[in-house]
Structure formats: C-alpha cells, structure tokens
C-alpha cells in the first residue's frame, strides 16, 4: 500500500489537494495552518476564529498579504451553540449564507477567514475540518456542524471528546464520515504504542504520559500569570496543565479509546525517572504502586514530553529477546516515545481519514472513564463555576460507572454552572449540586449520548 506521501504526490499530479478548514487561531491552530501549507497535497482554504483581528496573525505566520485573505464576517456561530439539537439533526439548514463568494475566493487561491465556524461546514471545497480551539462547547458545535455538512473531523479538542466523543463518533459512522482525534497529542501517540503492544499479544499493564510542568491542583490563572506568559500560553490553558486537569482529560481520552481504566480516582501521578518506570508501574505485589493491570496514569519526571507503556509476556524466548534488547529484565518491559509534536503531526490523521477512511484514535461505543469536577477552593452557594483552567475547579479521572453512580458533574459540562450549596475545597461536585443549563447544544449532545449508552446497556 502506498504511503501517505506517495498518495499526496498523486493528488498533486492530478492538480488536487486535501482541502482543510481550521477552527481556532491560537498557538496550536497557527502551527497546524503553517505546517499543512508547507506540505504538498494539503491546502488550508478556510480558517475560523471568534476574533476577526486574527487575520493579521495569519498573514504574519504565513507570509501573506491582506489581499490573500477573503474576510467573511458572520454571526451564526454563537447562536448554534444554543440551537435545538433535534432541529439540526433533522436536517434543517445550518445557516443562510451565499457561498459563491467564498468559492470564488478559494478558486483565486485565497484563504477564507471568518468568525463563524459554521461556515466551514458548508463551504463545498472543504474536505476535513480541524478543531484547534480547546473549548468544550465550541468543539461540540464545530464537530457536529462539520459532520452534518458532510465533512470529516480531525480534532485536537480532547475536552470535547471526553464529554461527547462517543455520540459524535456515532453520528459520523451513520453518515459514513470520519471523526478522529488528531495525531501528535499524547493520547494519539499512546494509541500507537497500544496498538503495537496489543497487536503482538502482549499484556498491557499501564499506559501513560510524562507531565512536563509542576503539579499544583490549586493553581489558577492569577498565580500562573507570569509562568504562562513566559511559555507563550494563555492563563487558563496553562492552569489546566498545572492543576492536572489536562492530564486527566488526556488519559480519559486514551481510556475511552482502549478500555484501559484509572487504577484509582485521579490516578497515582508519581515522580519517577524513565529508568524507574518498570519498578513503579507494576503491581503492589511486585513492589510497585498498582492495584490492577490494564490502567492509565501519568508520571512527573524526565520522560516529559513523552509517553510510555509497560507490558508483559509469558513467552520465554520473547522475554529473553526483550531482555537482550534492554527493554527490561522482566517480568515487565517498557515501550516509550520521548516526544510528541501536537499540531505538526496532525496531517497524518487528516491523511488517514481522507485516504483510508479510518480514525487515528476514537472513543469506543461508550465512555470508559469520566473526568469529574472537584472544588479548587471553598465555594459558596451562588458561585459560578468558571470551568477548565479557571479559579474554581479542577478535574479528576474516574471510571465512568463510579462517576455515574455518584451523579458527579463531568468537567466538560461544568463551565457556567451555578452552585446550589456550599462546597469545601477538594470536594467533588455532583450534578445535583448545581444549576445546570440543559438546553445548550453541548448539554443536549451529552444527554443524547447518555440515553444512547443506557439504551444499549438495557438491550444487552
């Protein structure tokens, strides 16, 4: 089978390309746009961001003039996030907009820039829509409208995926489209290691990531202001990294794609070097920290920004070979990749979706893990939760059944919920503890997903 490079070259010879629309012009979005446009066979023909001022960044990053951009300002993106889901799924037109001008601009080799992500779903030239926003509600809108507009979706938005990924996959499957997490992020890179080990019949003990910043569950955008600026990140984004929520989300994403589970609520997150991973991530009976095998976790140490997978085998000759190759002395062995390149690796998942009609990593039919909402500080009745990376809450991974049993609030649904009761610091927050807006598009998708999962379990 031809590799992606040869297939892309084949497109170029035919005067064709994989046409991509990108939503979100932050650090990641700019990286994706720039890298895609440097690979023959790809073409970014449309970009969406809530701020039309980002046109200047696009021009600067790509070395373009303002005349190379067709600006199409519109106002539908905000309202679609509160649209009735049944109306959208029934096939009602997403919006009223003439796309002749956008098609003319694309034909003239211009990039369409809009503040309305729903436009990308209906621009006929676009093959794949990439979500680089990181906002749960926007990610739901981007993916759903793109799928209903007959576009494949490659997303870096793990926040949305761990909240409504299974229902988005179901919608994609029903339309013979591809919904996939993008190659290059930790869950996607770990999926490669998982498929390798699982395909060879190895017993998977633990898969996880290295965390490349300090862990402080009570960090907030104010306490991290200088650190975030130094790293070129927004305060909320950096807070989600440092307070551990992002690692919880990423490992929940892997869990939902593989069936691996957290060993305990919040995982163990030990400090350990690469040389210590085998002795740490093994069963307690063998001197490690794990209660069971087949789990996800993360480690603070010299592995960051890489990923690891600990496995075992019963084959005597294979054990001898693994020992000889310095992968461990047994009974457990280590696979690891010391890097991941989010954004830059995204083209691989786009190409697989386009050429092979397969996802890089995608949830199974239901959630395996949930990331629950926990109070970051003492909260009072009437306080509004400011969501992932904010001042009020952080996330902890747990098994989906455990979270559902306690009716705990998924972190992806927490933004703008208002507390009905006081909550102590580090206390989990349930859905019963908050006033919850059930009419947003995100909430409607989540309810449809929960109902679908429940019906499937009932039928079984």
Image (cartoon, rainbow, N blue to C red):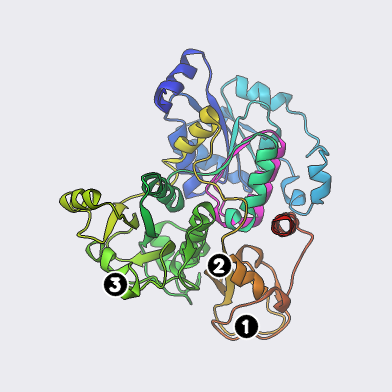
239 up-or-down from 15: above or below: below
Q: Between disc 1 and disc 3, whose residue precedes?
A: 3
Considering the image in quadrants, where does the C terminus appear? bottom right
Q: Is 224 left, or right, of 123 in this rendering?
A: left
Please name the residue shown 42% across and 53% down the image: 186
- State the residue lying farthest toward the left: 324
Is 352 part of what is drawn in magenta? no
Secondary structure beneath label 2: strand
What's the magenta region? 130-159
Q: Are marks 2 and 3 in contact (CB under 8 Å)?
A: no
Q: Between disc 2 and disc 3, whose residue precedes?
A: 3
Along the line of sight, the residue nearer the viewer: 264 or 270: 264
Along the line of sight, the residue nearer the viewer: 424 or 253: 253
Q: Which residue is mark 1?
A: 379
Please name the residue shown 27% across and 57% down the image: 333
Secondary structure beneath label 3: helix
Please name the residue shown 81% across and 35% down the image: 96
How far apart are labels 2 and 1 at the CA level? 25 Å
Q: Which residue is mark 2?
A: 399
How far apart are labels 1 and 3 at the CA level? 42 Å
Task: Please state the horizontal and vertical placement of residue 143, each as a whole percent of the image.
Answer: 65, 45
Q: Which mark is residue 286?
A: 3
């Amino acid at each position: 089978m031809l590799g992606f490079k040869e297939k892309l070259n084949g497109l170029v010879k035919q005067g064709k390309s994989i046409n991509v629309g990108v939503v979100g012009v932050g650090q990641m979005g700019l990286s994706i746009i720039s890298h895609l446009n440097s690979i023959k066979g790809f073409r970014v023909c449309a970009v969406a961001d809530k701020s039309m001022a980002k046109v200047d960044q696009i021009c600067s990053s790509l070395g373009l003039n303002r005349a190379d951009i067709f600006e199409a300002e519109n106002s539908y993106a905000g309202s679609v996030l509160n649209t009735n889901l049944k109306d959208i799924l029934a096939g009602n037109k997403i919006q009223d907009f003439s796309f002749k001008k956008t098609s003319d601009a694309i034909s003239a080799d211009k990039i369409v820039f809009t503040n309305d992500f729903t436009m990308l779903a209906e621009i006929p030239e676009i093959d794949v829509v990439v979500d680089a926003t990181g906002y749960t509600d926007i990610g739901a809108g981007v993916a759903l409208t793109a799928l209903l507009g007959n576009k494949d979706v490659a997303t870096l938005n793990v926040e949305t995926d761990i909240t409504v990924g299974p229902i988005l996959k179901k919608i994609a499957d029903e339309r013979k489209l591809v919904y996939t997490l993008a190659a290059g992020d930790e869950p996607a890179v770990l999926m490669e290691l998982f498929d390798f080990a699982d395909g060879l019949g190895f017993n998977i003990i633990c898969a996880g990531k290295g965390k490349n910043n300090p862990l402080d569950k009570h960090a907030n955008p104010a306490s991290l202001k200088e650190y975030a600026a130094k790293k070129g990140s927004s305060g909320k984004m950096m807070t989600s990294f440092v307070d551990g929520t992002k690692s919880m989300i990423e490992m929940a994403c892997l869990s939902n794609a593989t069936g691996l589970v957290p060993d305990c609520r919040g995982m163990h997150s030990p400090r350990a070097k690469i040389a210590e991973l085998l002795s740490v991530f093994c069963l307690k009976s063998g001197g490690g920290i794990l209660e069971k095998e087949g789990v996800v976790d993360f480690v603070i140490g010299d592995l960051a920004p890489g990923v690891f997978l600990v496995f075992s085998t019963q084959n005597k000759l294979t054990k001898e070979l693994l020992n000889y190759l310095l992968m461990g002395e047994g009974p457990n062995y280590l696979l690891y990749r010391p890097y991941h390149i989010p954004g830059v690796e995204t083209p691989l998942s786009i190409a697989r979706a386009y050429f092979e009609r397969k996802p890089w990593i995608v949830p199974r039919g239901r959630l395996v893990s949930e990331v629950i909402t926990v109070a970051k500080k003492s909260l009072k009745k009437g306080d509004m939760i400011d969501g992932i990376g904010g001042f009020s809450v952080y996330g902890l991974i747990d098994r989906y059944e455990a979270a559902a049993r306690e009716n705990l609030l998924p972190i992806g649904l927490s933004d703008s919920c208002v507390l009905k009761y006081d909550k102590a610091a580090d206390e989990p927050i349930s859905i019963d503890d908050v006033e919850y807006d059930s009419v947003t598009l995100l909430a409607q998708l989540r309810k449809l997903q929960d109902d679908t999962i429940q019906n499937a379990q009932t039928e079984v």
